[in-house]
Image: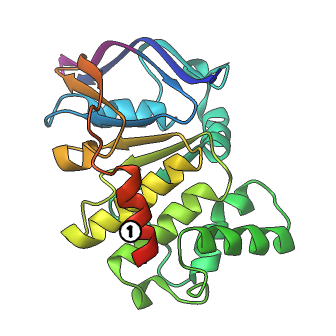
Amino acid sequence: MKKSVIQVQDLTKIYTMGSQEVRALDGVSFEVQENEYIAIMGPSGSGKSTLMNLIGCLDTPTSGTYILNGEDVSKFDDSDLAEVRNREIGFVFQTFNLLPRTDCLSNVELPLIYSGVKTAERHERAAKTLERVGLGDRIDHKPNELSGGQRQRVAIARALVNNPSILLADEPTGNLDTQTGDEIMMLFEELYRMGNTIIVVTHEPEIAQHARRIIRLRDGKIESDEPVENPALDEEEIMIESAAG
């Protein structure tokens, strides 16, 4: 039986802007099991970015509970949240967020430095993770020596190197051309099949279609939460793509 990684109950986030209150999230509840592949969708202003910040422990809710691997992180202070982020969540951003003057290996090692992992083990784990995303031959390259797709693979390796509970991706193909975006979504598919729990925040239906479940938000509430009947990649396509690559 798969365990529950995320339990969100009646999550609300209210921002005060001058004399006005903006209810960005309004009583959101859902659960995420281990090795689920979920897309969170919604129009601008629907609350998806706010929800991503709460799931990613970048912010705390106004009310409600967020249980992450058995811990109620909705009550944590900033230092506790930082520790949980580094341990439990691997972030993949649209803009890659790589350090431009350091090589791939050093970029991927960053979360391990924050975790206090010793140098030799850091190098080994970072190199293995870069191999896992198809960049074993690029460990000495700097970001400006890589294509956009390769930079995103470095960012994904950095997100994976600490073996997080969740891989949380915010518009991961937003800065990539269609073909490169497809390659990155193929990589997410492979990671999902290897047992990773993946949450992708996107406004693009074709990207969401790669997931196995789509949560749609509107006006701070969950409008629908449904399985994807025909995911964009099936087993045969994965095998064909892997053989071609």
The quarter in which the C terminus is drawn is bottom left
User: What residue is rendered at 38% in x and 67% in y?
Assistant: 240
Q: Is residue 200 above or below residue 178?
A: above
Comparing 69 with 142, the one in front is 69
Query: Could one spot residue 31 in this view of the protein?
Result: yes
Q: Mark 1: which amino acid?
A: Glu
Image coordinates for residue 187, horizontal then vertical, percent = 44, 61
- Magenta part of the protein: which range? 18-29
Q: With 220 as the anchor, is 240 left or right in this view?
A: right
Q: Quadrant of residue 17?
A: top left
Image coordinates for residue 225, horizontal then vertical, percent = 29, 20
Q: Is residue 174 above or below residue 152?
A: above
Residue 24 is covered by the magenta coloring: yes
Query: Could one spot residue 204 in this view of the protein?
Result: no
SS class of the residue under badge 1? helix
Q: Is residue 217 above or below residue 121?
A: above
Comparing 95 with 128, the one in front is 128
Residue 189 is covered by the magenta coloring: no
Q: Quadrant of residue 186?
A: bottom left
Q: With 116 as the anchor, is 145 left or right in this view?
A: left
Image coordinates for residue 88, horizontal then vertical, percent = 63, 40
Q: Is residue 111 above or below residue 61?
A: below
Image coordinates for residue 10, horizontal then vertical, percent = 40, 8
Comparing 99 with 176, the one in front is 176
Q: Pointer 1: what residue?
A: 241
The quarter in which the N terminus is drawn is top right
The residue furthest front is: 236
Chief SS of the magenta region: strand
User: What residue is rendered at 14% in x and 37% in y?
Assistant: 44
- Badge 1 crowding class, 10 Å Cα cut-off, few under 14, some 14 to 19, many 20 or more, is few
The residue furthest left is: 43
Comparing 58 with 144, the one in front is 144
